Image (cartoon, helix red, strand yellow):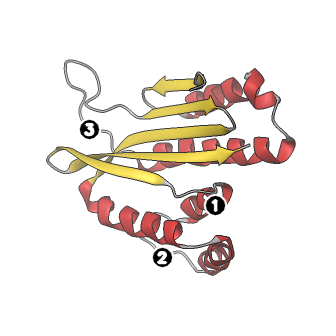
């Protein structure tokens, strides 16, 4: 089995500055720059969306004596012709069912159905309490040729640690 190449391996809070640093790290990686432009765009866009989701939706609870209970994480790795983006962050348990529904939905649809869903969602008017229509998940599903893998691990009352893995073929 060929060796895995780590492009980004980050764990910690996400800020605008952190986003910029992580994206610059990706853009400067030789493995990224060797890719054809369409693949670079798919990979970059997926990483942007992943970081943005952490920034917008991560639940930050009190810091314990060891640091964060579960700090957000982002990794980008390459093995052979596949880049794997892995992300994780703490979420409120009240969001888990909705996220599962959105992820299961995009995983069940083919490319044409995803495009139709994207158009339907983008043309909806957002409600006052709407936290997002799942456009980011739909977009990420369009960029990968396999299902988005995900998991929710309960960590303490009211919180779960959400992990998601997206593969981008070169």
In the picture of the structure, the residue carrying the numbered disc 3 is: 61
Q: Residues within 10 Å of mark 1 (few under 14, many from 20)?
A: some
The answer to whether any part of residue 23 appears in the image is: yes
Instruction: Compare residues 68 and 150 and report the one nearer the observer.
Output: 150
Residue 55 location (% of width, % of height): 49, 43
In the displayed structure, does residue 51 sit left or right of residue 35? Answer: left
Q: Are marks 1 and 3 in contact (CB under 8 Å)?
A: no
**Which residue is located at x 52 percent, y 31 percent?**
75
Q: How many numbered circles are shown?
A: 3
- Residue 35's label in the rendered image is none
Residue 72 location (% of width, % of height): 41, 34
Q: Secondary structure at mark 3?
A: loop
Q: Are marks 1 and 2 in contact (CB under 8 Å)?
A: no
- Looking at the image, is mark 1 or mark 3 nearer the viewer? 1
**Mark 1 or mark 3, which has the lower sequence index?**
3
In the picture of the structure, the residue carrying the numbered disc 1 is: 139
**Which residue is located at x 62 percent, y 31 percent?**
79
């Amino acid at each position: 089995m060929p060796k895995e190449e780590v492009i980004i391996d980050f764990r910690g809070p996400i800020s605008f500055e952190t986003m910029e640093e992580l994206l610059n790290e990706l853009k400067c990686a030789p493995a990224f720059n060797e890719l054809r432009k369409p693949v670079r765009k798919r990979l970059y866009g997926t990483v942007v969306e992943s970081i943005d989701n952490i920034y917008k939706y991560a639940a930050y609870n009190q810091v314990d004596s060891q640091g964060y209970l579960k700090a957000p994480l982002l990794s980008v790795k390459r093995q052979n012709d596949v880049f794997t983006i892995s992300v994780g962050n703490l979420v409120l348990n009240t969001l888990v069912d909705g996220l599962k529904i959105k992820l299961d939905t995009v995983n069940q649809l083919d490319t044409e159905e995803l495009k139709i869903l994207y158009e339907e969602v983008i043309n909806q008017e957002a409600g006052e309490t709407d936290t997002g229509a799942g456009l980011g998940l739909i977009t990420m599903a369009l960029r990968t040729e396999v299902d988005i893998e995900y998991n929710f691990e309960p960590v303490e009352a009211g919180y779960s640690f959400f992990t998601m893995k997206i593969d981008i073929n070169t």
